[in-house]
Amino acid sequence: MSAPVAKLVEIGPDAEGQRLDNYLLRVLKGVPKTHVYRIIRSGEVRVNKGRAEAATRLALGDSVRLPPLRLSERAEQKSDAIARSAPARNFPVLYEDEAFLAIDKPAGVAVHGGSGVDFGVIEQLRMARPGAPMLELVHRLDRETSGVLLVAKKRSALKHLQDQFRERETGKTYLALALGQWPAKRKVLDKPLVRYLLPGKPGTEGERRVRIAAADDPQGMRSITLVRVAETFADFSLLEVTIKTGRTHQIRVHLASEGHAIAGDDKYGDFARNKALARQGLSRMFLHAWRLRLTHPSSGETVQLEAALPPELAGFLAACRPAVTGQG
């Protein structure tokens, strides 16, 4: 097998506006996701001869240096086989036209393959729609979060919608069930966040986590969350949470930092309470992408999308409400 060499790739219309990490995950078939992020952080991947971040947006005509990567033919065949083996699956459609579609993503399904997951929503959707010229994720939701998820059907729509997310022009509101009584006057959380990795097994990276950053931490990313109490229960608060910044695990970390973690959150929550909640019928994290407001990429009109609470969450809330007794 000949020694691998670095390659220079020019970005064409099919990749214009795409994040660098997403582009690499698409073109470097068979390369583990953790390795893709490692070569970005190390500076081995270059954009126009300069270092770039995972979130860097690629422009038409950009020159991307791909470092030498030794990948066996067997690994490439395995990657292709996994992509082809994704089961075809359609998801409830909230909105669809020629530019994009909005689906109601169920909890427990990753949005894409990687990090120990062979396939996710996008791979299953592509298998269910083999005739679609293009299907690309506009944004992401955590695996355990349900609700509104956008998928672009045109490259122009993908770029336009991603620009709206990046420029904070969309309105994203979630429903979260927080432990305890949330203070009604606590309406704005403005706390910087920083990502880190837990210790992993030898030779592997640990699991990704996020924490509140110190005010002077240069790695801290400003993160703003707006909170409104929708309903109170004996032991919980149902919150309408609007995020002004789309940081990883933002809602989960912000609420937990206030002492009111999301019910069922297995990363930042109360593990003892989670076990008790599972016995009460809540077997997942109570976080749901409820409403999304955006500007249509073609018409310029405002589009309002809403995904109702899934039955398992609505049912848990109903069980928490006091029984209504008759009078007379």
Image (cartoon, rainbow, N blue to C red):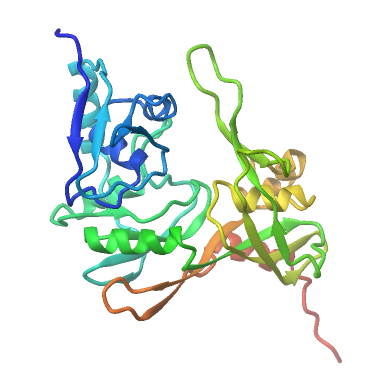
Please name the residue shown 30% across and 57% down the image.
90
| Depicted 281 relative to depicted 41: above or below | below
Q: Nearer the viewer, residue 16 or 150?
A: 16
Instruction: Find the residue positioned furthest to the right.
Output: 328
| Depicted 78 relative to depicted 286: above or below | above
In the image: residue 195, left or right of residue 79:
right
Visible in this render: residue 262? no
Instruction: Find the residue positioned furthest to the bottom.
Output: 328
**Number of numbered discs:** 0
| Residue 216 on image: x %, y % | 71, 41
Please name the residue shown 73% across and 72% down the image.
231
Q: Quadrant of residue 45?
A: top left
Quadrant in which the N terminus is drawn: top left
| Residue 265 on image: x %, y % | 65, 46
Quadrant in which the C terminus is drawn: bottom right
Q: Quadrant of residue 180?
A: bottom right
| Depicted 241 relative to depicted 262: above or below | below
Q: Quadrant of residue 92?
A: bottom left
| Residue 288 on image: x %, y % | 55, 60
Visible in this render: residue 131? yes
Q: Nearer the viewer, residue 299 or 135?
A: 299
Please name the residue shown 21% across and 50% down the image.
60
| Depicted 61 relative to depicted 227: above or below | above
| Residue 269 on image: x %, y % | 70, 44
In the image: residue 219, left or right of residue 294:
right
Instruction: Find the residue positioned furthest to the front.
Output: 49
